[in-house]
Structure formats: C-alpha cells, structure tokens
Image: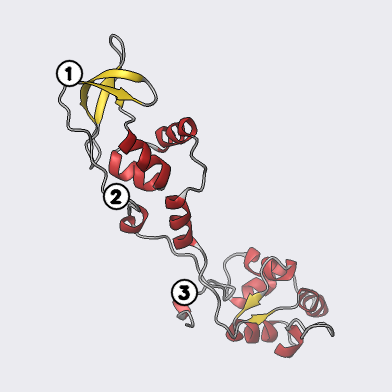
C-alpha cells in the first residue's frame, strides 16, 4: 500500500511515527496480579530475600513494597509474577503499569539477566520501524547527483533550498548514499533543480543483475 504524501519526509522516504501511549504501554502477557498480602506480611523477594510488606507502589498495578532489616525506604518485592513481567514486557510498559522509572527497570533487568531486546521491546521496536516505501520507489544514483550538482555550480545548501527542504542534511543524505530510495515527485523536482533529465539521476543496474 502506497503511503500518503503526509507520511513522507522531505526526501520522499516514509516518515517514522511515534506509537501512541496506548501501544507503548500495551502488555504482551498481562494481566499481572500482585500477591494477596497485607502490610506486615513477610514475603520473599527474589532480589533481597525475605522482608515485610511496608506499603504499596503508586503504579496502576499496585505492587507491595518491602523493607529488609530496620529502617530504609520500601522497595518493590520482586516476586515470580513481577519477574515474569520484567522478563517479557518492554521498559515502557513496565514503567507505565508499575509506576517505576527507567533506571529501576534497567537494574531489574540486569539482576534478572534480561536481554536488552526481550519480546516486549522487540514488539515495541517493530511499531517504530519505518514503513516501506512504495513498491515503485526509485533509487537515486549518488555519483550522478554529485556530477550534476557540480556541473550546475550549486552547493548542497542551494539544492536543499531549491527543493524547499529546511535542512541541508536532507539533500546530503541522498548525495552521500545514506538514503537512496525516493519517490517520483522528489526525483522530478531534483532534476529540475539540477537542470537535467530525471532519468539521468537514477541508479542503473549492473550488467550482471537480473
């Protein structure tokens, strides 16, 4: 399916879209149930050992806090259920549902041996991946761009301005080869700016290509 023009950035490539909060906080394997305990109950934490419940967290899933020893601030009780969440859910989802910060999640993951890209993080990353360009997208030739730009006596900035792009990097990525695919309207506008035929800016197949 061809992206709408509003879904394309200044170089004609598909624009990344930030997933809404509802998607970033979506749980893969929820719901997660806190242990049925009261303040003063002794429970076992996988990270700290035995401790007594001294209160509750402020997240949407109210999790018991425990205090090990005398005094000190209560810490989340790392039960088997919370560990299951940390191992499977994205950092964003854990922060949203359990009311903790990213630093806390990082510590939990490290102590539990959770990889950076667990199932929840991979799913979230997939929402951020750039949509594919239209199947009829065109591939720009880096040498051709540079050749016609120099022949026209234009700088990268002048070409970017002629294209109506706010950043010189929008053109620079094309000429450097960091971004090669574009759409027909962008190709035609480039050809106009460089005073050449649009076909001359296209990357040609090698003789061995099928």
Circle 1 sits on which residue? 40
Between tags 1 and 3, which lies in front? Answer: 1
Q: Number of numbered discs present?
A: 3
| Gap in angstroms between the C-alphas marked 1 and 2 | 27 Å
Residue 176, horizontal then vertical, whole percent: 74, 66
The disc placed on residue 7 is 3
- Which residue is pictured at 30% across the width and 23% down the height? 44
Circle 2 SS class: loop
Determine the image quadrant of residue 154.
bottom right
Q: Nearer the viewer, residue 163 or 135?
A: 135
The mark that comes first in sequence, 1 or 3, is: 3
Residue 126 in view of the camera? yes
- Which color scheme does this rendered protein use? secondary structure
The disc placed on residue 114 is none
Q: Residue furthest right?
A: 207
Circle 2 sits on which residue? 30
The C terminus - image quarter: bottom right
| Gap in angstroms between the C-alphas marked 1 and 3 | 55 Å
Q: Nearer the viewer, residue 89 or 161?
A: 89
Mark 1 burial class by Cα count in 10 Å: few <14, some 14-19, many 20+ = few
Circle 1 SS class: loop
- Which residue is pictured at 57% across the width and 83% down the height? 135
Horizontal side of 36 relative to 172 (left or right) equals: left
């Amino acid at each position: 399916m061809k992206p709408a023009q509003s879904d394309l950035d200044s170089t004609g490539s598909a624009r990344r879209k930030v997933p809404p909060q509802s998607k970033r906080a979506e749980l893969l394997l929820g719901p997660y149930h806190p242990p049925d305990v009261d303040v003063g109950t002794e429970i076992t934490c996988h990270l700290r050992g035995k401790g007594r419940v001294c209160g509750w967290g402020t997240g949407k899933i109210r999790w018991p806090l425990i205090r090990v020893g005398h005094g000190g601030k209560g810490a989340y009780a790392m039960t088997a259920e919370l560990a299951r969440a940390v191992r499977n859910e994205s950092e964003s989802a854990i922060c949203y549902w359990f009311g903790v910060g990213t630093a806390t999640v990082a510590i939990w993951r490290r102590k539990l041996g959770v990889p950076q890209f667990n199932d929840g993080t991979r799913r979230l990353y997939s929402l951020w991946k750039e949509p594919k360009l239209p199947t009829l997208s065109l591939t720009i030739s880096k040498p051709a761009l540079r050749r016609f730009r120099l022949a026209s006596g234009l700088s990268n900035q002048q070409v970017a301005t002629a294209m109506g792009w706010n950043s010189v990097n929008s053109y620079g990525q094309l000429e450097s080869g960091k971004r090669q695919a574009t759409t027909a309207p962008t190709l035609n506008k480039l050809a106009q700016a460089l005073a050449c035929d649009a076909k001359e800016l296209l990357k040609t197949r090698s003789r061995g290509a099928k």
